[in-house]
């Protein structure tokens, strides 16, 4: 029960890696908020793991603030936030990505991290500190062609994580990130362009361990970094990628 009585928000918790993190946190004793733009998916996961669902668009300030207020109203405190919600664009030449796609990617993948600082740092500073965990990607460390603006958003997240860690450490707030390789999530088809056995085989050939990341992998890594076992770890980008970035 490494997260016993901790209150944790997991954005994008209704599916994929987020759902795996919700499951693990719940098993480890946390009181979990499943925050997702798809409230139906959030409710299904919440019902499975006795968690609290909240509808949120993490790219919108008022929606993010509402998520924080609802969490406080239900649990009275927030100890952990996992900024997991993320989107990508389909593989294409960088100049072919529409401006609206670009804006949406950075609003969801990057601006959401800003909102977590804006609305949670004052609360955590006034309390007993806390943990911010950002879900980055191997794309921010070892970029692949034709996903340039997604890669860039995750590179931004990695730099933001390190900067936040340095600034917030004296306030008792740890900030880390996990960097998964592609996994069995709703985004896999978008990364591959087309989910075919041939494209899967080609991508798996770049992962030394020979498989995709799983929601369970993400849950285990996230649980460690958000637990007191990692009390001396901040500013770390933990590659959960089967050796992809070596």
Image: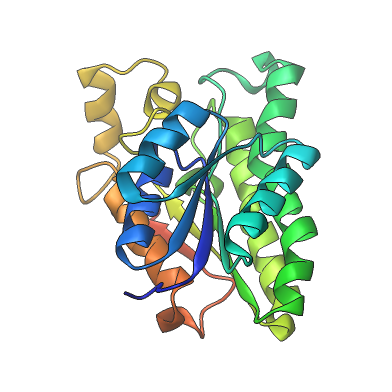
Q: Is residue 79 left or right of residue 239?
A: right
Q: Is residue 202 visible?
A: yes
Q: Position of residue 110 (x, y in %)?
A: 69, 44
Return the residue found at the far front. 74
Judge whether 136 appears above or below 204 on screen: below
Give the residue drawn at x 52%, y 60%. 8
Q: In this view, does 164 lie to the left or right of 189?
A: right
Q: Is residue 231 left or right of residue 244?
A: right
Q: Where is residue 41 in the image (x, y as percent from the top left)?
A: 43, 30
Give the residue drawn at x 66%, y 56%. 73
Residue in front for this viewpoint, 94 or 28:
28
Q: Can residue 241 be seen in this view?
A: no
Q: Which quadrant does the C terminus fall into?
A: bottom left
Q: Quadrant of residue 148 in the image?
A: top right
Residue in front for this viewpoint, 218 or 121:
121
Give the residue drawn at x 44%, y 35%. 43
Q: Which quadrant does the N terminus fall into?
A: bottom left
Judge whether 6 appears above or below 57 on screen: below
Judge whether 35 appears above or below 83 on screen: above
Q: How many labels does the image show?
A: 0
Q: Quadrant of residue 59 in the image?
A: top right
Q: Where is residue 226 in the image (x, y as percent from the top left)?
A: 47, 70
């Amino acid at each position: 029960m490494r997260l016993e009585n901790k209150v944790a928000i997991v954005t994008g918790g209704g599916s994929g890696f987020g759902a795996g993190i919700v499951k693990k946190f719940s098993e480890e004793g946390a009181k979990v908020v499943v925050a997702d733009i798809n409230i139906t998916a959030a409710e299904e996961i919440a019902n499975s793991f006795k968690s609290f669902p909240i509808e949120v668009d993490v790219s919108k300030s008022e929606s993010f603030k509402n998520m924080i207020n609802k969490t406080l109203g239900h649990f009275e405190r927030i100890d952990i936030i996992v900024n997991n919600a993320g989107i990508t664009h389909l593989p294409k030449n960088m100049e072919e990505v529409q401006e609206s796609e670009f804006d949406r990617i950075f609003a969801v993948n990057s601006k959401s991290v800003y909102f977590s600082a804006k609305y949670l740092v004052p609360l955590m500073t006034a309390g007993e500190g806390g943990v911010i965990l950002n879900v980055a990607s191997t794309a921010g460390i070892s970029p692949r062609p034709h996903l340039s603006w997604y890669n860039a958003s995750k590179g931004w997240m990695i730099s933001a994580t390190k900067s936040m860690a340095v600034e917030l450490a004296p306030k008792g707030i740890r900030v880390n990130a996990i960097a998964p390789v592609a996994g069995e999530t709703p985004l896999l088809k978008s990364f591959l362009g087309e989910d075919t056995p041939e494209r899967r085989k080609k991508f798996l050939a770049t992962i030394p361990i020979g498989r995709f990341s799983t929601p369970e992998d993400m849950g285990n890594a996230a649980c460690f970094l958000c637990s007191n076992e990692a009390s001396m770890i901040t500013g770390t980008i933990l590659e959960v990628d089967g050796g992809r970035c070596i």
